[in-house]
Image (spheres, helix red, strand yellow):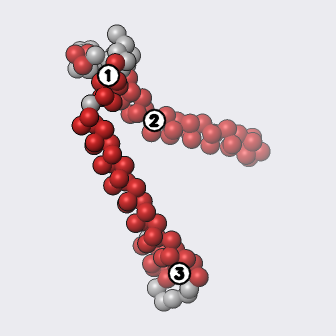
Amino acid sequence: MTAMLSRGRPYLLSLVGFVVTLAFLGPYLVMLLDALRPSGDVLESPPTLLPRTWQFSTFGTVLSDPRFLSWLKTSLLVAGASTVLVLVVAVPAAYFTARVRFPGRRAFLLLV
């Protein structure tokens, strides 16, 4: 019995990983499908997963709006600056924590 369980374990773990992946990707799929349907169909009753009519022009409309491009530029600037700031602070802190033994190090690592 244990030999059978040990042989099936990789398959079970793969299946669980696949289900978890689907659970995390599900909302993104719903957002994409909602973006591809006409705005009047988003709140239709009863709701359907796939759009009745596909509308690909939504992406072109959004990308051609100068306000969107300004917002995108601002978001990328903030995300980039935040990433650089976090790396500048975190890399030396990680190096110090890995190399130097200090009182409370274990508690610090558990906290972090």
Residue at 56% in and 86% down: 100
Q: CA distance from mark 1 to mark 3?
A: 50 Å
Q: Amino acid at mark 1?
A: Thr
Residues at badges 1 and 3 in contact (C-beta under 8 Å)?
A: no
Q: Amino acid at mark 3?
A: Phe
User: Does 90 sit above or below residue 35?
Assistant: below
* Observer able to see residue 22: yes
SS type, badge 3 = helix
Residues at badges 2 and 1 in contact (C-beta under 8 Å)?
A: no
The residue singled out by tag 3 in the image is 96
Residue at 48% in and 89% down: 103
User: In this rendering, would 16 be left or right of 90?
Assistant: right
> Which label sits in the foreground, 2 or 1?
1
What numbered label is drawn on residue 25? Answer: 2
Residues at badges 2 and 3 in contact (C-beta under 8 Å)?
A: no
Q: CA distance from mark 2 to mark 3?
A: 37 Å
Residue at 40% in and 33% down: 28
What numbered label is drawn on residue 58? Answer: 1
Q: Amino acid at mark 2?
A: Leu
What numbered label is drawn on residue 107? Answer: none
